[in-house]
Structures are given as structure tokens and as C-alpha cells.
Image: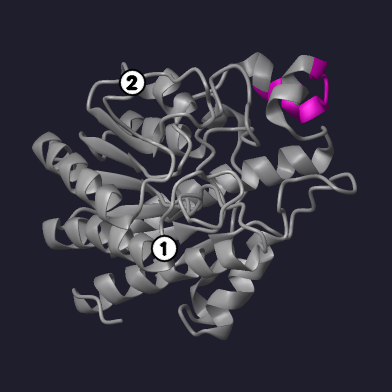
Amino acid sequence: MNVYYSDHYVLPLPEGHRFPIEKYRMLRDRLLEQKIIAPSDLKESPLVKPDILELAHTPDYIEAMRTGNVEEQTLKRLGFPWSPGLYDRSCASVGGAIAAMEDALRDGIAGNLAGGTHHSHADRGEGYCVFNDIAVATRLLKRDGRKKRIAIIDLDVHQGNGNSSILRRDEGVFIFSMHGEKNYPFVKVPSHLDIALPDGTGDETYLSHLADGLIEVRRFDPDYIFYQMGVDPLKEDTLGKLDLSFDGLMKRDELVLSYAYRSGIPLSLALGGGYAKPIELSVQAYSNTYRIATDVFSKGSVSR
């Protein structure tokens, strides 16, 4: 399975910033150390070009992020200070999503060790999300006529308001978001299917709702899946408010990935959120998802 990384693009953050930027390199190292992927599977994410970003974003917003001519209120919503590294890293995150999509079309599955920036809207970023990688890649697939029915399965604990604001009126797109009811964003943009969960939801209830949601995905009958594999539903996540265990998250991944494998639907992974303390717990959960993915797509079953 080819996996794209962009953590070599430096994003300078001030001392004490709450975003755990180190998790991306930690995950890449862990995947290699645990032999979940081989060194030959790792690929450097290409930088997406502005004309491709324009499939989902306004030219004015792209240019503002490129040059740093960004309004203070926009940066406040985004949660990051502007820097040239912010633009480059964000372009690499989208480039990795597109490259993973291309590889998944050929191989069945591929991953991006970034992305899942589902709070980014056409004209602005929010919630640590600059450009919306899944929206850009979805529009690219549709523009080129290679896939007709695209499903986004978004299991990040935060509702994908940017995915919905950009894509919900696009023909042949189905967005399924399962998230914390009272969590960010506090004003949701409706998806095609939203399952909002109360604080403290544990493994059993979560997995039951997921099974119901996947029934609706099957009815849509997608021919491509973007899987937002955020691990912030984990009990130890500082922003999650749900109560999932590592085993619950792995069963979640098994449900989604086995469905795609059995149905012959190509799927690409987007990293999404993870804010546990210590951050090693989020990294462990991310790596578990990749372990499930490699097991399912190499053997057709999961052994743990």
C-alpha cells in the first residue's frame, strides 16, 4: 500500500500551541518501526497546483493563503499563524490526497499521512484546516469522469462542515458523517447522512450506529470511498468527548475497510483528527488503522 507523507514541510508554531504537529512524523516512524508498511511504500507528497485547488476553493482565498494577505479573523478561525510553510504544507497535504486517490484507483487502497481537513470551506479555513483535500480530490475525480458515485465516510469526532458546504449539492456524492453532537463545529452544515452522538458514547453504541450508517452507504452504491479515519473518538482524546477504546476504533475500521474490500470499491485514507495526551496514544490509534487496512486488503480478513 502506497502511503504519502508531507511532514518534512515545516510549519512553525509558537511555543505552547495546542496543535500536536509532531504526530505526523511520529506516525510515519511508527509505521516503519512496526513494519506495518515498508520503506518502499512511503512516497513524498507532491504539491498541488493552484488551478487544481480551484476545483473546491475560490481564487481569492488561494491567493491570500499563498501570499499571506490573510485577514486576522480568517487566521483566528483557522487556528494557525500564517507562514510560507503553512501554504506549502497545506498544498502537500492536498497533493498527497490526490496521489493516494490515483494509487487507490490502481491498487484498491492507499493512504495520506495528513489530510482529512474537512472544516475548510470554499472561501476560508477553520479548525486547523486550510484547504479541503477530500473536496478537491472528489471534484477532480468527477471532472475527469473516472468515477460517478463517490462516498465520503467521515468518522472524525467533529462534523465535516467544510465537506458539506462544498460538496453536498454535487451530483453523485454522498457524505456520511458520524460525530459528537455537542462538539465542534457548533453550527453544523448538514451532510447527506449525519449521525450525531452524545458525549460518553462507548464502543457498543458507536458500532451499532456505524453499522446503520453503512447500510445507507451501501444503498448509495459508491464506486469510490474517501475514508476520514480520525482517531479523536478515542476516550483519551482531549477534544473528543466520546468514550471509544482502541479495540472499538479497530472494529470501526474493520467494518469500513472490509465493506470496501468485499465490494471491490477503491478507498483512500485521510488522517483526520487526533489530540490525545500523551499524543503517543493518537499515534498508536492511527497506526492500528493502517494495520487493519493492510491486513484487510492483503488477506481479505483481519487477524488480531
- What residue is shown with label 2? 168
At which x and y percent is residue 52? 53, 32
- Residue at the limit of the structure toward the front, as seen here: 200
Give the residues drawn in magenta, as a range: 62-72
What residue does disc 1 label?
245
- Find the distance from the CA under tag 2 to the CA under tag 1: 31 Å
Which secondary structure lies at badge 1? loop
**Mark 1: amino acid:** Ser
102 above or below 52? below
Where is the C terminus found, in terms of image quarters?
A: bottom left
Q: Which mark is residue 149?
A: none
Image position, residue 236 (x, y; %): 55, 57
Query: Residue at position x 27%, y 77% from top?
Result: 298
Image position of 193 (left or right of 281): left
Please report the residue visible at 48 percent of the width from the left and 56 percent of the height from the top.
234
**Residue visible at 69% across and 23% down in the picture:** 77
In the rendered view, tell whether residue 124 sits above or below residue 272: above
First in sequence: mark 2 or mark 1? 2
Q: Quadrant of residue 90?
A: top right
Magenta span contains residue 176: no
Amino acid under label 2?
Arg
Q: Which is nearer the eye, 231 or 164?
A: 231
Res. 223 visible in picture: no
Q: How is the image coloured?
A: one colour
Q: Nearer the viewer, residue 236 or 171?
A: 236
Left or right position of 61 against 111:
right
